[in-house]
Image (tube, rainbow, N blue to C red):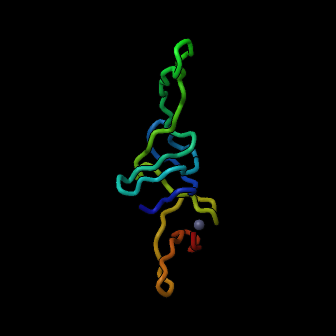
Amino acid sequence: MRIKKGDTVLIISGKDRGRKGKVIEAFPKQGRLVIEGINLRKKHMKPKKSGEKGQIVETPAPLNASDIKLICSKCGKAVRTGYKLKGKKKYRICKKCKQAL
Ligand SMILES: [Zn+2]
């Protein structure tokens, strides 16, 4: 997966298509990402003590990495990324502006 925690991304499908957000959690094995404020699901919280009211909180549900495009922090466009080797280190690069991300 080429997107990691902390990246800014663009949603390209689903009900939040066209919106941007920051990746707050990444699950590389499943190829899924949680993006701040995107794909919100209502969760019912049960009251902890008797007499307390249950609450409904909205939490972002994970999205498939295929529904997301990285926004390049250098050129500000939704881009595809590639990799470049420099010595033994691998760099992620923006395919548009060729800058390391
Ligand atoms: Zn770029």
Image quadrant containing the N terminus: bottom left
Residue drawn at x 62%, y 62% is: 73
Residue drawn at x 56%, y 74% is: 98
In the rendered image, the residue lying farthest to the left is 30
Residue drawn at x 54%, y 28% is: 57
In the rendered image, the residue lying farthest to the front is 49
Residue drawn at x 59%, y 71% is: 97
> In which image quadrant can residue 7 be found?
bottom right
- 44 is higher (above) or lower (below) than 64: above
Front residue of 88 and 39 = 88
Q: Position of residue 20 (x, y in %)?
A: 58, 47
In the rendered image, the residue lying farthest to the top is 51
- 96 is higher (above) or lower (below) than 39: below
Q: Quadrant of ligand 1?
A: bottom right
Tally of numbered discs: 0
Q: Where is residue 67 in the image (x, y as percent from the top left)?
A: 43, 48
Q: Where is residue 13 in the image (x, y as percent from the top left)?
A: 44, 43
Front residue of 12 and 9 = 9
Q: Position of residue 8 (x, y in %)?
A: 58, 54
Image quadrant containing the C terminus: bottom right
